[in-house]
Image (spheres, rainbow, N blue to C red):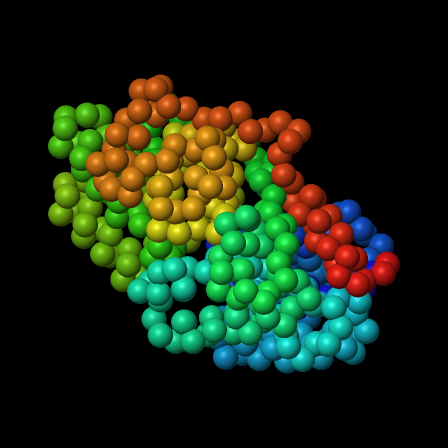
Amino acid sequence: MRIVFDALGSTELSGGMRLHSTEVIRGWLKSWPDDEVIVIGPEWAKTEFGDRADVRVWPNEDPIRRSFGQLVYSAVVASRERADALVSLSPIVSPLRRRLTACFQHDWRHKLNPHEFPIHQRAYRWLWEVSAKRADFNACISGKAQSETTRFVPSAHTVVIENGRDHARDWPAFERPNGTPNVVTFGHHNNKRPDLVIGALATLRRRGADAPTATVLGARGEYAETLRALATELGVADLVAFPGFVDDTTYQQIVSTASIVVMPSSDEGFGLPVAEALYLGIPAIVTSDSGMPEIFGDDVVSVAPTGDALAEAIAGVLDGALGAADVTGSELMTWADTASQLRSNLRLAGLTA
């Protein structure tokens, strides 16, 4: 099979989007090494796949150049290479490609919570609806993502191809330190709501409890300064660290040695850090309005989106009243399964290989 993967929707610091692109392509290359795989992506894709795939580098940090790459350049490459299929790992796939196309739908936050997005981002994401209508099928990363896709684009052909949950399998083993427990949370997008975790620490300290420390990954620039100011105002500046974006090894060490992973997001299409935590046997706390209780069920602790509710849950986990589920068994969805389901759906959509 000759397949073109469009990874331009995954910028260098896109977090879950980049991880998704990396793991889907890795899964495909490992399972079908004889396929001719062409990856259209930024420089990081050359580093990641250059020895196993034909990588065509296209800049994607600027939205205009990224859009041109996805809408035009990807179709040109697929046509010139006579590819059997063009698969976008983001919600946008070129409408100029007439043969088999598919795209991945991750979330519809711009529809559910438009206040979290400036007008130019909402305008860019309008392309998602156009793409969803024209693609031969939309691969939705969860049942939640599928229900939202059909809600906002009723004519879209959708299938569920869930994210794998085993990418922490390749992480190094890190020894968890003794001492004050550490909570890991995230701040690379404003829907992550790390301010609720900071508020939870303040609640625990105010009640005289031994508050854990917290690491807020991904927050940077003005937003990080706003969070630092909040921590100072609430009297917990000494408890909260803001390392910003970190390299892969540092990220893996921070998450692997966490006492709890807390994701109080306003909305998630899946929640990859939760999958990481559960795979590693680390308790995960999420908020009831995030969509993650629907995805992870009883494996996570779900609470109301308030600092007080999070404080109660954090205290419960640290006291041993709440814990981590055992989800490392053979029933675990893997990224190899994700790649296999993608290939099966390409065949069902009309590809013969």
Between 341 and 80, the one lying in front of the other is 341
Residue 252, visible in the rendered structure: no
Q: Quadrant of residue 282?
A: top left
Q: Tell me residue 171's x, y (percent).
A: 57, 38
Q: Tell me residue 325's x, y (percent).
A: 49, 26
Q: How many marks?
A: 0
Q: Is residue 81 left or right of residue 158?
A: right
Q: Is residue 312 left or right of residue 187?
A: left
Identify the residue at the far top of this view.
Answer: 320
Q: Is residue 240 above or below residue 156?
A: above
Q: Is residue 142 above or below residue 284?
A: below
Q: Is residue 341 above or below residue 254?
A: below
Residue shown at 59%/47% (left/top)? 163
Between 264 and 175, the one lying in front of the other is 264
Between 102 and 64, the one lying in front of the other is 102
Q: Which quadrant of the rendered structure holds the C terminus? A: bottom right
Residue shown at 32%/36% (left/top)? 303
Residue shown at 45%/26% (left/top)? 324
Residue shown at 52%/74% (left/top)? 127
Q: Tell me residue 84's x, y (percent).
A: 80, 67
Q: Tell me residue 102's x, y (percent).
A: 67, 64
Q: Quadrant of residue 210?
A: top left
Q: Quadrant of residue 105?
A: bottom right
Residue 191, visible in the rendered structure: yes
Between 55 and 199, the one lying in front of the other is 199
